[in-house]
Image (cartoon, rainbow, N blue to C red):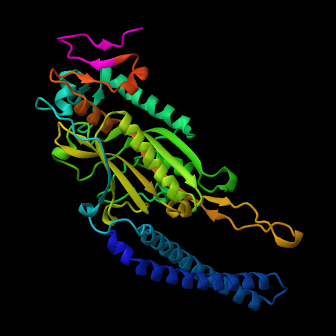
Amino acid sequence: MANCADRASQADPRAAVALYEEWLGLQAQVGELQAERNANAKQMKAPLEPAEREALVAQGKALKGRLAGMEAELAELEGRVQEEGRRIPNETHPDAPRGGEDASALVRENGAPRDFAFAPRDHVELAEGLDLVDFNRAAQVSGQKFYYLKNEAAMLELALVNWTMQKLQRKGFTPMMTPDLVREGVLEKCGFQPRGETTQVYSVQDSDLCLAGTAEIPLGGYFMDQILPEDQLPMRLAAFGHCFRTEAGAAGAAGKGLYRVHQFSKVEMFVVGTPEQSEALHQELLDIEVELFSELGLHFKVLDMASADLGAPAYRKFDVEAWMPGLGRYGEISSASNCTDYQARRLNIRYKPAPKPAEGGKKPKKQKNVFVHTLNGTACAVSRMLVAILESHQEEDGSISIPETLWPYTGGLEKICPKETEATTKKKKK
């Protein structure tokens, strides 16, 4: 109860326990009734007088009717147990700040805000001035909060994705391309709620499929119902995927332009490890994010997020917020979460520990299978990365200097210039 209060969760663990105990009691009654029905069926096989057989037939019909009603009641009760149980969030790391978002603690700050000699524009004005994005046509085709990327912006998205994926591959991550559609059950087991007025999930009508809001979901499902050898852990995956979010309730200047949209591309890190590895793996994910965003020349801060701002699966979460000078505020560009065994228990992902050596020359003792820990971190959420890059690297004439680390991935493109004043500048060949 205290953990739910810390996380501002509406879950009621006591109600979940009471429903579970009720389910156990009803399950026992169903078991007794099934045994009685089986005994009745067994008696029917013996030689019987007509009157005896008729009595047993009547008894069998009555048992069948009662059993059907109780099994339906048991199924309904099991659904309520599952629903109440899914609302219960993960435990919270003892060092995570308690309270609302304002209680989140500053972990580190990288760089300093750029000192502009001119009034910085926001990314919408910059992108439209450079013919990089079209919100109006997208609104006619798909609706509000969709967009077309054009010209150098389209190439910049590909450059960011390729640069990020190759960086992660060199760090031992397995590159993955994931499905955009996942089954509702997988989404729920990962700790997301596909139903309800405030859901962020798009559901496919007359289907149990949903559009994934993050590659974390299909990556978690990839390991579902598997038992992994301990010597293969940790397993590091880097997935490129498309993300779809309803952004229910989101409005206002905070969601301007590319900052809050219904569809975007993302490179997601996902790690499966042992309980003993997960703390170090969480720090590893954060260190990678810091390295990536530093190389892009961004000023940002890292926050240890407060308990009430944690999603249900997260035991602890670090957010990275970049300074966006045109918007005049910090904006979240990434997060890294340790979900411990919260998702693994629901997805049934375990590992087989190596046998421990026994004393006295006996055979090694087999160990019970253990639930893994899952972790995730955003390496590159493209739409918000574009916001940060366009606004941080703008020039007074409206041009954009592309971070040098991306030049090998942009075909030599170093700068995006206004079309009417100068052609796109390309890197000079030596």
Q: Main secondary structure of the magenta part?
A: loop
Viewer-side residue, 352 vs 206: 352
Specify the quadrant that holds the C terminus.
Answer: top left
**Residue found at x 56% / y 53%:** 272
Q: Is residue 18 above or below residue 238?
A: below
Task: Answer with left or right where residue 243 lies relative to residue 423.
Answer: right
Task: Answer with left or right where residue 374 lies relative to residue 109.
Answer: right
Viewer-side residue, 198 vs 60: 198
Which residue, as the protein is rendered here, is positioned at the far left?
Answer: 119
**Residue found at x 37% / y 60%:** 311
Q: Is residue 211 above or below residue 76?
A: above
Q: Is residue 323 above or below residue 361?
A: above
Q: Position of residue 53 (x, y in %)?
A: 75, 87
Q: Is residue 428 magenta?
A: yes
Q: Position of residue 297 (x, y in %)?
A: 32, 34
Specify the quadrant that holds the N terminus.
Answer: bottom left
Q: Is residue 153 magenta?
A: no
Task: Answer with left or right where residue 277 lies relative to residue 82.
Answer: right
Which residue, as the protein is rendered here, is positioned at the far top?
Answer: 430
Dividing the picture into quadrants, the one containing residue 300 is top left
Viewer-side residue, 295 vs 307: 295
**Residue found at x 16% / y 47%:** 252
Q: Please indicate, yes or no, whether residue 138 appears anywhere in the rendered image.
A: yes
Dividing the picture into quadrants, the one containing residue 260 is top left
Q: Please indicate, yes or no, whether residue 139 appears anywhere in the rendered image.
A: no
**Residue found at x 73% / y 60%:** 354
Q: Position of residue 112 (x, y in %)?
A: 24, 41
Viewer-side residue, 324 vs 227: 324
Q: Position of residue 48 (x, y in %)?
A: 82, 88
The residues colored magenta run: 414-430
